[in-house]
Amino acid sequence: MEPKADTKEVKIAQNPIPSPSVDPKAADHGPTKKESIEIEIETTKGSVQRPVRTLSGSKKNVHWSPELVSGSQEADHSYPAGSNPYNPYIARSPPDTTDASLKDTMESVKGALGRWGRRVAEAAKKTESLAGNTWQHLRTAPSFADAAMGRIAQSTKVLAEGGYEKIFRQTFETDHDEQLLNSFACYLSTSAGPVMGVLYVSNAKLSYCSDNPLSYKNDGQTQWSYYKVMIPLHQLKAVNPSASIVNPAEKYIQVISVDNHEFWFMGFLNYEGAVTSLQESLQDIGLRSV
């Protein structure tokens, strides 16, 4: 004997009160108190029937089908509405929100900010040092305006001549294998006062030449000549950095030869660089700074 298929049947019975005439304006779309509406949904055996009373007083008998309840499926929200999950041009990549990844990202950001902060601090320190050295460099000359114009003229000369390397070889006698390591704008202290010029450091000697020629008397006649100093590195005895006790901004470098001749350089635009370069030259030839 084949099992009977589930059937659903809806029965609606109305017994309205007969009326000789119906006024369309007074017609009510809802049931009256004397109306009875029965809705019955028959399903398989074992379905539960629960009477429901409406506001109008009529009774409704409803049978819920297990298939209607169990057969419903929850909406799939795994894809955006209107999108095709089988679209070959769409790919999903879930964000990596693990604690380890977040920690690594934060550490990377902190590291980058730390490096940036250190660079800014170093740049600010160098800028401050350069500004102070430039101010002191211009103040060292007898005339502030003349010092500024002289520095501009020297920079123009360097550009026109093709750099300090060419000026160095044109100004001093050099060996074939001699190489210029550094050059520093500064002053040399003389009996006539500080003289503006450039200090050259090569792998063979320490040299200085004034930017402009100086006047001197020779047999009662005034002559002009560049002021030069040349000390071979093997003749260097000491390089001593120092500063004025009264004004610490005034910094000097004392250079002493092995025969105890002293030269005082001051007003450096790059004082720290000059000290480092000269002391390294001493170390290269095995001498000790005193």
Image: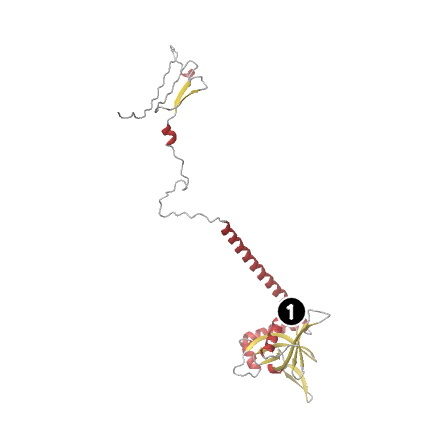
Can you give x and y, in whole percent of width and height, for residue 286 in the image?
60, 79
Residue 193 figure quarter: bottom right
Is 250 situated left or right of 17 in this image?
A: right
**Position of residue 102 measured from the top left corner of the image (x, y, whole percent):** 51, 51
> Please, is residue 252 above or below residue 90 in the view?
below
Q: Which residue is mark 1?
A: 133
Q: Is residue 49 above or below residue 153?
A: above
Which picture quadrant has residue 258? bottom right
Q: Which amino acid is tagged 1?
A: Asn
Front in this rendered view, residue 193 or 74: 74
Whole-percent x, y for residue 180 in the image: 55, 78
Q: How is the image coloured?
A: secondary structure
Q: Is residue 223 above or below residue 250?
A: below
User: Which quadrant: the C terminus?
Assistant: bottom right
Residue 281 picture location, percent across and down: 59, 77
Specify few, some or many for label 1: CA neighbours under 10 Å numbering under 14, 14-19, or 20 or more: many
Q: Is residue 114 above or below residue 216?
A: above
Residue under the image location 39 percent in, 30 percent down: 69
Quadrant assignment, res 148: bottom right
One can see residue 195 in this view: no
Quadrant that contains the N terminus: top left
Count of numbered labels shown in the rendering: 1
From where the camera sits, is residue 224 visible? yes
Considering every residue shown, the one lying at the far front of the view is: 1
Q: Which of the pair 82/165 is nearer the observer?
A: 82
The residue furthest left is 1
